[in-house]
Image (cartoon, rainbow, N blue to C red):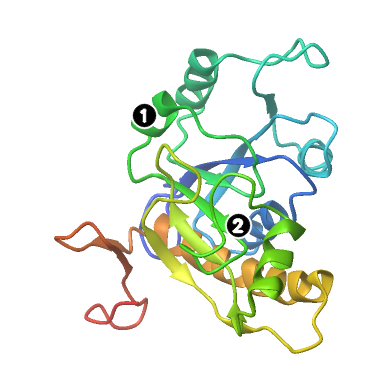
Amino acid sequence: MDSGAGDSGVRRKRLAVFVSGGGSNFRSIHEAALGGKVNGDVVALVTDKPGCGGAEYAMCNGIPVVVFTKLKSAPEGVSTDELLNVLRDLKVDFILLAGYLKLIPGELVKAFPRSMLNIHPSLLPAFGGKGYYGLKVHKAVIASGARYSGPTVHFVDEQFDTGKTLAQRVVPVLANDTPEQLAARVLHEEHQVYVEAVAALCEDRIVWRDDGVPLIRSQTNPNAYT
């Protein structure tokens, strides 16, 4: 009988991913789960844009798509309470934001404490907050003269991009970079660092310091943290 646990002996976690666009990070996480790199399964795709690439990928891979919230163009959308009921019915353990541009309602944040991650394409707290998304982030980084950028994985609170940082990767900002070139370099790191962070989450390797800062415990050395 399948116990539902991975090689680590930890129960496979049930993941809901929120997207607003193409969902390349969503695809990376789903592929990592299928390939055994993440001890979890994507059981729902939540989107505010039912025609986006992420939703199409989900439908093609048999992942239920939930539209949130109700829109004139999407009357099938659900309310916050209805979404909470759907997530509970699916027994979702963790919520992963992957290019989701809407602010998460406080009720949802409270229902999933320390259980919701986001990835942002800059080294937070720099170049984060409302209005900083997509190429706007990379344009601002280049215009500032910053020499380094990179993605940040952080826990979600009730504001944009202000939750505690879990993981970051650093990439150089080159002298002649365009926003598109910098975006591609950062995205490459996003796909790696987000999968690694989600893997740690699903293996119960997140440890919280007394001051509320999350750390990732090493897979190979239980006394080492990042």
* Label 2 Cα neighbours within 10 Å, binned few <14 / some 14-19 / many ≥20: some
Q: Which residue position holds label 2?
A: 33
Q: Which residue occupies 63% across, 67% down?
A: 190
Picture coordinates of residue 163, whole percent (x, y): 39, 51
Q: Which residue occupies 52% across, 69% down?
A: 123
Q: Which residue occupies 79% across, 16% down?
A: 74
Q: Nearer the viewer, residue 144 or 12?
A: 144
Q: Amino acid at mark 1?
A: Ala
Left or right: 33, with 27 as reference point: left
Q: Which residue occupies 54% across, 20% down?
A: 83
Q: Secondary structure at mark 1?
A: helix
Q: Amino acid at mark 2?
A: Ala
Query: Quick check: can you spot residue 37?
Result: no
Query: Quick check: can you spot residue 138?
Result: yes
Picture coordinates of residue 26, whole percent (x, y): 68, 52
Residue positioned most to the bottom: 175
Q: Which residue position holds label 1?
A: 111
